[in-house]
Amino acid sequence: MSAPPSPSGLRVSAWNLLLLVPFLMLVVPWFNSMEPRLFGMPFFYWAQFAFVPVGVICVAVVYRMTRDEPHSSAPDLLPEVDELDEGTAR
Amino acid sequence: MIQWVELSIFVVLFVVVTVLGFLASRWRRGATLDHLDEWGLGGRKFGAWITWFLIGGDIYTAYTFVAVPALLFGAGALGFYALPYTVVLYPLVFLPVLRLWSVSRVHGYVTPADFVQGRYGCSLLSTLVAVTGIVATMPYIALQLAGLEAVLRTMGLNGVGLAGHLPLFVAFVILAVYTYQSGLRAPALIAFVKDILIYLVILVAVVYLPTKLGGWATIFDAGAAKLAQPSPTTGKPAGSVLLTSTNQLQYVTLALGSALALFLYPHSVTGVLASRGRDVLKKNMVALPAYSLLLGLLALLGYVAIASGAKPITNNATGRPDTNTIIPVLFDQQFSSWFAGIAFAAIGIGALVPAAIMSIAAANLWTRNIYKTYLRKDATPAQEAKQAKLASLVVKLGAVLFIVAVDPQFSIDLQLIGGVIILQTLPTVAIALYTRWLHRWGLVAGWVAGMGYGMYLLYLIPNPAAKKLHFGGSALTLDKLDVFGWHPFAGSQTQIYVGFVALVVNLVVTVVVTAVLRATSVSNGHDETAGSDYHADEDSDRVKPVAEGALSSG
């Protein structure tokens, strides 16, 4: 049922490169300063808080844009009950 | 003095989760609990919400809640590494975790060492991974107890000697019994209560406390002033609200090293393998950073504690101030006693969830990769489940003895060592998910080199504040880095995380030995996995049935 995989089982998608973006947060000298402050919080702290949504967006985009093995039975749109874990295990 | 209101609320909530823990064995039960897929992985069917709470309970533990703010309280900006750590974590593990889930689902692997055994067909290598996992997990469990005890002592249960540990002991016996009965379902169910309480407490704390104490600007200024004062033992400032030229590298390598290490810990793998499918995991990688936000806000409570003038409590068992009590003390002083009781229950239950998952993960490793590999090769699934239940009791008992017998400070040091040692399994587990190019004996050699060198570097690190000459932390001054007597960075005061250095050594040795063995065509063992196994999803016809063989064996 699956697409023929490469011998190593690796599947490459350019979208995965987005996962590298949050690592920009590790370049500490960019934000290691007190000013500008936000609500009294030094730049060092609020700049890093700002990276949390950046990380979420990058991972979310990769999730949406890359697909697994094509499902024969399950369509892309999951039923609402599945979101709430109410469905019993297969 | 015992705080009766706080203690009563704590006990009531504790009783609620205990009842939940026992009821969990009936929750969405499979045909039998006598199989590791059921007892140890909750039937491999957790959906997105349960997985979110379970992995959240795994990563954001009681110890995190007390120790990260305590680090900011004592050392300043360096302690904030917890935020970048949990931000880079999910993009980093997004792809490898999916591969691990798929290959484990197809072959029925329960532990990371099972995967290594299947990938390389080498018992030595899988045993190394299993033993490393167990050794790294033990101090982690002990630390959860340290977090729980910090709360109990703040509520006035601060007894001397062995009797002082009695409340902790009672709490843990209860935990041990319901984990024995319900397996992974118990922490999964309790994690709901834990997280609701934690979110409530943190949101109230970060809104209410800064308002009460004059706003964030005042709080950060108070922190800066206090940290700039010279320490009485070393004569140097204790820290700073910004990173300095010497600890920036430490900050970055500690964040990255911790992120690389996290999903190598057996308890994280347990949370991943218990989920139903790839889509559940992907959703979680997007949603789990909600906790990162919480953790960052919580970390700042370390500065709030400085601004409020809170002082850590002296632990009557050791006679020394325990900085881990700083957040409980802050809550005790600033909140009304009933809300402080809720906050303490949140932290206390926050200790029980990860402690249960960790003991289950360690028990799974023992059962699958030591008991079944060496002691009883023909063990049936029912015997495996029995063995794992007993092992989980032993693991918890060991952790309690650990806390009673040794200074809590020592378990914190051991936790730092634990991070360094679990990182040494990265080439064998994480890289092997992508390629088998690395040779099995190269991986063994790299593990030995990285482990040995890491321990040596940790031995070199003193801690003048605690008056210790060795094993004083995980920040190595580059000046001390020594390669067979050669000091490549002599004179440099820049600090780096030891685990990172040890991992680099491990990788270099692994690659060099692999190149030699490949050139001489030494056998690299048998690989039972196929490329497509790493992409199989829950509806694939290649996945192994859950709890296969449980019924036939009785």
Image: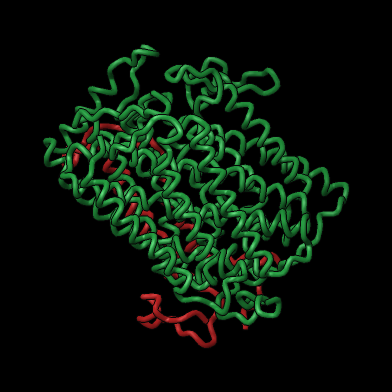
Chain colours: A red, B green
Q: Residue at x 38, y 24 (%)?
A: B320
Residue B434 position within the rendered picture, expressed as x and y whole percent measured from the top left: 64, 58
Does residue B87 appear in the picture of this structure? no
Residue B491 sits above or below residue B70 on the image: above
User: Considering depth in this image, is B322 or B495 the residue closer to the camera?
Assistant: B322
Residue B206 position within the rendered picture, expressed as x and y whole percent measured from the top left: 21, 46
User: Considering depth in this image, is B100 or B311 the residue closer to the camera?
Assistant: B311
Q: Quadrant of residue B35?
A: bottom right
Does residue B378 appear in the picture of this structure? yes
Q: Quadrant of residue B501?
A: top right
On-image quarter of the C terminus of chain B = bottom right
User: Considering depth in this image, is B70 or B452 the residue closer to the camera?
Assistant: B70
Q: Residue at x 23, y 30 (%)?
A: B310
User: Considering depth in this image, is B49 or B486 the residue closer to the camera?
Assistant: B49
Please give left or right for residue B129 compared with residue B358 in the image. Answer: right
Q: How many marks?
A: 0
On-image quarter of the N terminus of chain B = top left
